[in-house]
Image (cartoon, rainbow, N blue to C red):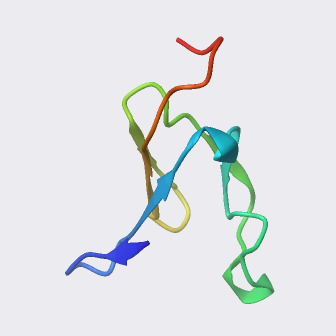
Amino acid sequence: MSETADRTRSVEVGAADLPLHCPPPAAPLWARHPRVFLDVLATGEAACPYCGTRYIFKGERPKGHH
């Protein structure tokens, strides 16, 4: 996990994190918002519309996904 100068969080995710949703299950209660599923396989990254966290897919794509 890293933060850029504009304070937007970037999180690297892999096949084990799919299906991806934000906030993640381990997020503290104070950091939660409505769950939204994100498609990181389409372009390799996706941003949460609620908190702006950017998720970047790293690693091998799971079998059966195009």
Q: Residue furthest bottom?
A: 30
Residue at screen point 61% across, 38% down: 15
Identify the image quadrant of residue 20: top right
Q: Position of residue 59 (x, y in %)?
A: 45, 38
Please say if 20 is above or below 5. above
Q: Position of residue 22 (x, y in %)?
A: 65, 58
Badge count: 0
Residue at screen point 51% across, 55% down: 49
Position of the N terminus, as image quadrant, is: bottom left
Q: Position of residue 56 (x, y in %)?
A: 41, 49
Looking at the image, residue 53 sits to the left or right of residue 19; the answer is: left
Given residues 43 and 13, the one toward you in this image is: 13
Identify the image quadrant of residue 31: bottom right
Please say if 40 is above or below 56. above
Looking at the image, residue 51 sits to the left or right of residue 22; the answer is: left
Residue at screen point 75% across, 84% down: 28
Q: Position of residue 57 (x, y in %)?
A: 45, 43
Residue at screen point 48% across, 30% down: 60
